[in-house]
Image: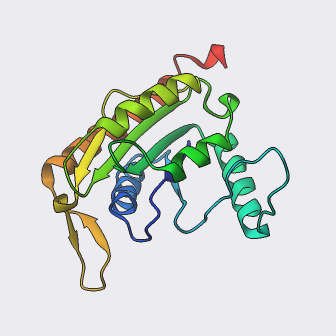
Amino acid sequence: MKGLMIIGSAQQNSHTRALGQYLIGQFNTHDCCDLEIFDLAEKPIHTLDFTGVNEVPEAYQQHAKELQEKAREADFFILGTPNYHGTFSGNLKNALDHLTMDDFKMKPVGLVCNSGGIVSSEPLSHLRVVVRTLLGIAVPTQIATHDHDYGKTEDGKRYLKDEEFQLRARLFVDQIVSFVNNAPYDHLK
């Protein structure tokens, strides 16, 4: 089973990336699962433009193509975003614009976000509407962390330190794995 986590932060070594790394460890406890991270801070993609007027750097085109290929192979998704002004990031919205309903149709989608200021799950509520529109199935458990839920190693890498969120992350992963294994909507794909 293959999963794709799309991280919408513009910052490398983001809190959302640290949560993704933690989730990889949790998926690894299930022998059948492989979660790959597509971090838009490391692999930026161009704004969707059907006019062809704007010149797009080759690297951005390659990143978009890679994202599309990985999305088509995925059995499930995790969408991760920072809380930008009460909603999900423009980077994540742009990435989703490069994908289609066929990529998400009847696949489970986990939702995670991090807030630097006021803790809010509002970005996840907005993403639930987007996931539903893309015909994906947003899992019930979601994760909304705050900067203070993370620590830093000596080399500056962030990690999820809050035990309550570690427990929530395990429940989150178990729900996604259960949904994929049971495949209740496979006949609708």
Between 69 and 82, which is closer to the camera in this rendering?
Answer: 82
Q: Give coordinates of residue 57: x percent, y percent.
A: 76, 68
Work out whether residue 79 or residue 178 is closer to the camera in this orientation and state it: 79
* Front in this rendered view, residue 87 or 80: 87
Tally of numbered tags: 0
Question: Can the viewer see residue 154?
Answer: yes
Residue 160 in the image, given as x and y percentages of width and height:
24, 61
Which quadrant of the figure contains the N terminus? top right
Residue that appears at 16% across and 61% down? 148
Q: Quadrant of the C terminus?
A: top right
Q: Is residue 36 left or right of residue 117?
A: right
In this rendered view, identify the residue nearer to me: 1 or 106.
106
The residue positioned 33% from the left and 57% from the top of the image is 19
Snapshot colouring:
rainbow
Q: Is residue 12 left or right of residue 114?
A: right
Residue 111, x across and y down, in percent: 39, 39
Question: Residue at left 39%, top 28%?
Answer: 139
Q: Is residue 189 above or below residue 32?
A: above
- In the image, farthest residue toward the right: 52
Question: Seen from this angle, which residue lies furthest top?
Answer: 187
Position of residue 79 relative to residue 16, above or below, is above
Image position of 36 (left or right of 175): right
Q: Is residue 159 above or below residue 73?
A: below
Where does the image place residue 112, in percent across and percent down from the top left? 36, 44
Residue 181 appearing in the image: no
Question: Residue reaching furthest front?
Answer: 53
